[in-house]
Image (cartoon, rainbow, N blue to C red):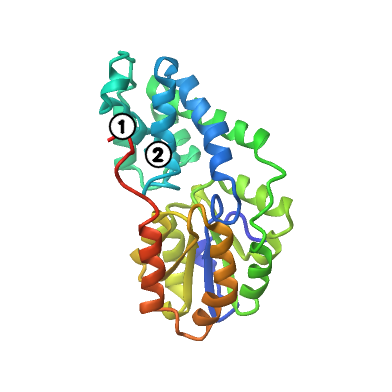
Amino acid sequence: MPELHPDFASYKPEKEFFIGIDSDGCVFDSMELKHKECFIPEIIKHWHLQSVSKYARAAAEFVNLYSKWRGCNRWPAVVMMFDLLADWPEAMERKPKLHPVTRMRRWLKEESVHSNSTLKALLAKEPDDAELKQWMTWSLAVNEAVADMVHDLPPFPSVEPTLQKMVEKADCLVVSSTPAEALSREWSEHGIDRYIKVVCGQEHGKKKDHLRHTAAAHYDKSRVLMIGDAPGDREAAEANGLMFYPILPGHEEESWARLRGEALDKFFAGKYAGAYANKLIDEFENTLPSTPPWK
């Protein structure tokens, strides 16, 4: 079983190479299900956005699924959704009462780890803050919805044989902004947790912190690879001077097949960096826009 609550100070490599792997949308085809059936309905419900539900849904889907912010932490994602709504004339014509998210913006700036546990700690200090209470209530409702809805969802077909090839030479870690409990449940449900050394989730900081404490601190950077489907995964790798392999949204199965049949061999042979890696990143950047389609 992988370590679920890692003590980064005591982390020790076991193999020569390191591979970090994102989970939602990367290993599991869960992004659409989680956001469309869990996150977004709870946003509309808890912030009373029924009058602009189709706009709120479109804005939230753009941020979380179809833009360069794909895969970002749940808290800033909702703030961005509100900002998009406020700047959408057709939505504002319906005169919705948009949440000011003032306290949340301040928390996002002041707190480096954005999770239920750190928000709970803040609420213990500010128990009468109605805005913070609303954010916590929403987040807990999302977790309940995910636990109820997201199951029987296997990894992409090429994932397990690729993991089998990875662990021959590499320590493999889950590097994700999803709560660790959900990660552990999803990976163990399908028996692929046995390939993982450590699960790093939302509670353990940002992805760049996960990589800094494990990969960057203990391995030759030329022997470290981060795998993900979102720009945040690439940014986390680049922040630590590490290499990145993209799982292209909409082309996940082909991406995993290429990783297993081509990219891993180049990585283990020391031939991944440079022109090959740059070509893959160019493909990746062209798949996710920064401007919403309604603009």
Residue at 66% from the left image edge and 61% from the top image edge? 2
In this rendering, position of residue 51 left or right of residue 28: left
Q: Amino acid at mark 1?
A: Leu
Name the residue beneath numbered marker 1: 84
Residue at 53% from the left image edge and 51% from the top image edge? 201
Neighbourhood count class around disc 1 (C-alpha, 10 Å): few under 14, some 14–19, many 20 upward: many
Secondary structure, mark 1, is: helix
Q: Who is closer to the viewer here, 55 or 138?
A: 55
Neighbourhood count class around disc 2 (C-alpha, 10 Å): few under 14, some 14–19, many 20 upward: many
Q: Who is closer to the viewer here, 1 or 8?
A: 1
Query: How many numbered circles does the render carry?
Result: 2
Query: Where residue 119 appears, x then y in whole percent?
Result: 44, 35
Query: Where residue 245 appears, x then y in whole percent?
Result: 46, 67
Look at the numbered discs 2 and 1 and tell me whether their residues touch, using CB distance below 8 Å: yes
Residue at 25% from the left image edge and 28% from the top image edge? 87
Query: Where residue 26 appears, x then y in whole percent?
Result: 54, 55
Residue at 50% from the left image edge and 81% from the top image edge? 266
Labelled disc at residue 62: 2
Indicate the quadrant containing the C terminus: top left, top right, bottom left or bottom right: top left
Instruction: Decide if residue 133 is in sight here.
Output: no
Rendered image quadrant of residue 15? bottom right
Secondary structure, mark 2, is: helix
In this rendering, position of residue 107 left or right of residue 162: left
Indicate the quadrant containing the N terminus: top left, top right, bottom left or bottom right: bottom right
Nearest to N terminus: mark 2 or mark 1: 2
